[in-house]
Image (cartoon, coloured by chain):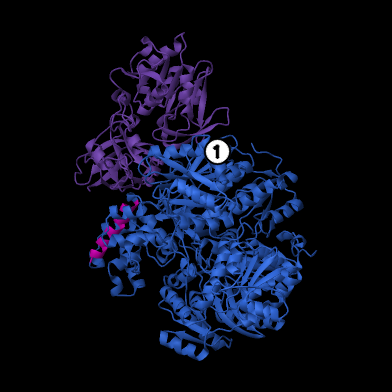
Amino acid sequence: MKENKIRKVLLLGSGALKIGEAGEFDYSGSQALKALKEEGIRTILINPNIATVQTSEGVADQIYFLPVTPFFVEKVIAKERPDGIMLAFGGQTALNCGVELYKSGILKKYDLQVLGTPVQAIMDTEDRELFVEKLHEIDVKTIKSEACENIEQACKAAQALGYPIIIRAAYALGGLGSGFCNNEQELIRLAEKAFSFSPQVLVEKSLKGWKEIEYEVVRDRFDNCITVCNMENFDPLGIHTGESIVIAPSQTLTNSEYHKLRELSIRIVRHVGIVGECNVQYAFDPNSEDYRVIEVNARLSRSSALASKATGYPLAFVAAKLGLGYGLFDLKNSVTKTTSAFFEPALDYVVCKIPRWDLGKFRGVDRELGSSMKSVGEVMAIGRTFEEVIQKGLRMIGQGMHGYVDNKELKIENVDEALQEPTDKRIFVIAKAMEQGYTIDQIHELTKIDKWFLQKLHNICETDKALHACSSVNVLDNALLLKAKQQGFTDFQIARALGLEKEMDIEKAILIIRNRRKQAGIVPYVKQIDTLAAEYPAQTNYLYLTYSGVAHDIKYEHDKRSVVVLGSGAYRIGSSVEFDWCGVQALNTIRKEGYRSVMINYNPETVSTDYDMCDRLYFDELTFERVMDILDLECPYGVIVSTGGQIPNNLAMRLDEQHVPILGTSAQHIDNAEDREKFSEMLGRIGVDQPEWSALTSMEDINAFIDKVGFPVLVRPSYVLSGAAMNVCSNQEELERFLKLAANVSKKHPVVVSRFLEHAKEVELDAVARNGEIIAYAISEHIEFAGVHSGDATIQFPPQKLYVETVRRIKKISKKIARELQISGPFNIQFLARENDIKVIECNLRASRSFPFVSKVLKINLIEIATRIMLGLPVEKPAKSLFDLDYVGIKASQFSFNRLQKADPVLGVDMASTGEVGCLGEDSRTALLKSMLSVGQRIPAKNILLSTGAAKQKAEMLEAAKMLVDHGYQLYATGGTSRYLTENGIPNELVYWPSEDGQPQALTMLHERKIDMVVNVPKDLTAGELDNGYKIRRAAIDLNIPLITNARLASAFIYAFCTVAPDDLDIKSWQEYGTGDN
Amino acid sequence: MRNVTLILDDGSRFHGTSFGYEAPVAGEVVFNTAMTGYPESLTDPSYAGQLMVLTYPLVGNYGVPPFTVEPDGIATFMESDRIYASAIIVSDYSSEYSHWNACESLADWLKREGVPGITGIDTRELTKVLREHGVMMGKIVFDDEPDNIPEAQYSGVNYVAQVSCKDIIKYNEGAPKKVVLVDCGVKNNIIRCLIKRNVEVIRVPWNYDFNQLEFDGLFLANGPGDPDTCVDAVENIRKFLDNPVVRPCMGICMGNQLLSKAAGARIYKLKYGHRSHNQPVRMVGTTKCFITSQNHGYAVDNTTLPAEWEPYFINMNDGSNEGVRHKVNPWFSAQFHPEACSGPVDTEFLFDDFVKLL
């Protein structure tokens, strides 16, 4: 039934991961490409996100690491001349780009057919007024909203509707620029920001407290519709769905309500004319069957990725096929393989999604949750009771919580207020309130959370109380133990509730509980997700574990052919799609070599949790307990802990103690690298230079050490979570703040503090070794000087400005370390280099964030080599080295400060970027320009505001400033910078800091949109400096004006756009680089 | 809560606890994969004599709506006058409920109506056993009364006779068109769907010879059990089909089977039936597909349909019959439930089709 004239299809990706648009689009794009490939269609992908699975070899035929903007997409269209384009798989970025291409006539010009939902339908759903009108035509109720073009109109509309109101920016992803306003003052403040993102702002009556329900709908061109899944938000309306805990399927809807909303969804999707997948969000009155449609997303979304993982229904795959013209009746259910794809999954389990926030990483950020998204990742827990999934989920988010109860004491000053004004900690505030004796009615009054959810949470508290009442493990009866396990309690929680911590080490206590319950036969059972609730036999390998069961769904072979890869968990700042790529490459290699590939992971935004990526997928926790449960069943050949970032790495020692066969570098050696003290001692022993260091055991020690070496210092805690592997602290306040954070995550291991070298280059080595011998490696160079967190730095590979001598020394040092630690598998070393003085600052015996980047630039899959080594298979040293490359790759960081209200968009201490891109070019300028444009920078039109920090940075920026003037840019500069520029003969206009009197004021100029780019380099991180600069930086972010805060990066960017015109950028696919015709 | 054991005919045992009426019970154990609608399913007369296993684990969440009755005599929220299923078997019963329209918990309702309910069962494993073995008889036994063993028979029992009305009931009297509804165990929503389209409904007992009445169309309702026990009904339908005055006819579920039998087709028992809200059907010869609500254990054998009849809908999963129609006359039926309740409402248009024909 498909249309056969389509032979070549262009698919738009979503670019760098950012808040509101994250890994879910790697999943959807990858599935779509798979679907196209199956049809023998040639595929072209534009996506600068080099760390994704979809931009890997073999996924698309041609991959362009270019910005997803009309300018670049048109160039690729002109070059490739595809027949069709798919806009629905790359989030709002792809959709917006597609709409622009349509409006400007480019699609028509190149006779390009939009596959799937027509652009008009997209515009009908995106433009609020059209949308309301369209739904009104079919008697579907929407939230009454007034589209406003300016602030006065918005105020008037709000007056008419009555406060509280909500405002939204049209055409914005993830609720960007939206929020609640209780009065006119708040409205003006928010509206100004919203108008900077969008020419149209919508003012709506707020329905705070209503239920929020979503449906995922699929329609084919024959008008057949299904709803694949519905979901209910635990948090009532008022909190963006991306910020809400979400349950699938809905729990508190009756049959009549469920099917009323289902019927409405189908009516809407038919009327709008969706072909493919669509998401419909409702506000639903908790006291009647009244409803409003909140919005319709005419594309794959975060919710559809979740629905896909929650049900096993491959939404993106099916949507792509429907885009080609298939009917749902033509396709098979890819889980059962026998039944039709035209069906609605029946779940026999419950699924809970919990967002992961990293607000602690941002200075000054507003922690309150609202209608705009701030979370950076999410987890999905599967189980057969609500209690089980919520507790699993709260552990999965990886913020040191053990479940709903038995956590570290949370200090809350005003519980009432904390319940009413939700923050990222709200669920724990509810736990606190229950502990303090708040009734369910009271909590419901304050939170408006449905009492059913609160009652379930209360059940957990009751069980916890019963456990606490047990005086010892001997009097714990089996019924209570089983009940606790069915409610998702871990052995840790039970041990803590029983008070075992007082008597012994907690890790020992956990094992006592574990043995106690195994003796009683209380073990989890493995269940399949089969889409039809066991109605039909299914050979599915999509699994989870639960205590609400009496039998396993699968039979184990016990043939020692399973190789288990531990995944990377929730996306967070410091650990995201790059580790998913590593995991997927490991799985591919394991499979290729004839082993059974097994993945454990719980992140619904990933490709590694697509059940066809491996032979067995456990969508479950990466805790010691759960991993051991699974290993007990699998009896694997081995376990890979080195491709999933820090979470699996941290498990190495404990698994090793239980005699788990860990593949690759031994757990003992992992510990020798992870434990900073042991590592620093080792470096001393083998004669490798490192900055002067000391191991911290007390604050006094550390202060004494700093008195000696002075600030800034580099602080390296052992076994840290969340990617904050090391930090530079410039003053006492920062030091204490960071140490508190570090001490939280690792009490057992000392923290190493060392002198920090300023104005040193930072260099990284990503490599693979076998039995201590390096087999393949890549050396890359940071553009910024050390001090910018390596995760935020702009990195070029191959290095362009390193001395040959430096490279030689780095190789020599790395060889020594690899040998000493007997490395087998992937590893990463970070160096500081000043002149040819090289110091080692960090070493991880696992894949690092930059593995996909260097692998793809080098075109050598380092993970594949590493996996073969870990499996004990022969490998050859690649013939090609980084010196052979005649092109450059540059990795740039994507920041999401626009999402994080009030956060200071300055780099340094903590990693702040949420994603990255990697672009290729014939030289660093072109590669840098492409990558900077990919992360949202724009080439400024005319006016540039400079405040370039301390003397040294000012000097660094001088050349760039001169170049700007030579290219006709008008410079504005604050006091010191202006003086410096003038002294050096560079014309500029003085503007004033917010703390100064005088005109023109820098802030005013920003608000009047007279500035096209801001370079604001903080002198240091002292409070006063931060305050003045903060206002400028924050205004730039809030007003959507490009901002750079690092002098070296700013210089490089300015040099690039002054010397290369966008039209002169090479438009080449990844495959075309390095073919010798450069 | 008292401990109970579900014992299946093949000897398998599942242990759980009782939350409903405390009495042992026996019946045919069937599974239903719907995720909502326990009040509707429990009151669906087609479940008479069956122990209903819900595969969706969390049950009882939204309580039970009030058992109010509308002026026309039909219950506001329920599908009949009482619970017909013999018991309900779930994994995780929610003792606390939350809903604006609920007036009691599922447990209280079950107790009030004398129906056992058990929880703590691995309903997925139970479903797999039923799927592999086919539906089976089963018993719920209280562990502290091991000698109190219930007995029951399912096959061969005429459940239709048990659940059908005993006298003629008329709804919406005086409406322009009259429809005879043969009550084999009709669900209220079928009657609601007809009344909504402004026809008079003359509900007659399953074995009543309606051919003597004056009417414009015939409606054959759903019902429990084995269609082969409904000989009288089939005989009456055959008379209707043979009548030279051709009048429209529509059937649902058991109605589909009785119409087919009257036309001359054969019926067979499915291994484990279709009981869910997600059954895909395709209208034969078209690209039109629908998600349907189903509850049946028997099916029409497509190959035995006489020449003047044809399959109307086909199940897209297993190819079984989902409806028949006459090639010339305005007679058709659906194996699924276009009236839904519970389940998706995609096929309600069939009622429009029927009423248009009158």
Residue that appears at 68% across and 46% down: A102
Q: Which residues are magenta?
A: A453-470
Q: Amino acid at mark 1?
A: Lys
Q: Residue furthest front?
A: A998
Which quadrant would residue A418 be assigned to in this image?
bottom left
Residue A261 lies, in percent from the top left, at: 45, 40
Q: Secondary structure at mark 1?
A: helix
- Residue B102, compared with residue A11, is above or below; it is above
What's the residue at 25%, 63% (across, down)? A476
Q: Is residue A507 above or below residue A182?
A: below
Q: Quadrant of the N terminus of chain A?
A: top right
Q: Nearer the viewer, residue A283 or B205?
A: A283
Choose top left, top right, bottom left or bottom right for residue B5: top left
Of all chains in the rendering, the one displayed in blue is: A
Please name the residue shown 67% across and 76% down the image. A957
Query: Where residue A1057 appears, x then y in whole percent?
Result: 72, 67
**Colour of the chain lettered B:** purple
Which is nearer the eye, A471 or A116? A116
The residue identified by callout 1 is A134
Depth check: give the residue in front, A955 or A741: A955
Q: Is residue A909 above or below residue A183?
A: below
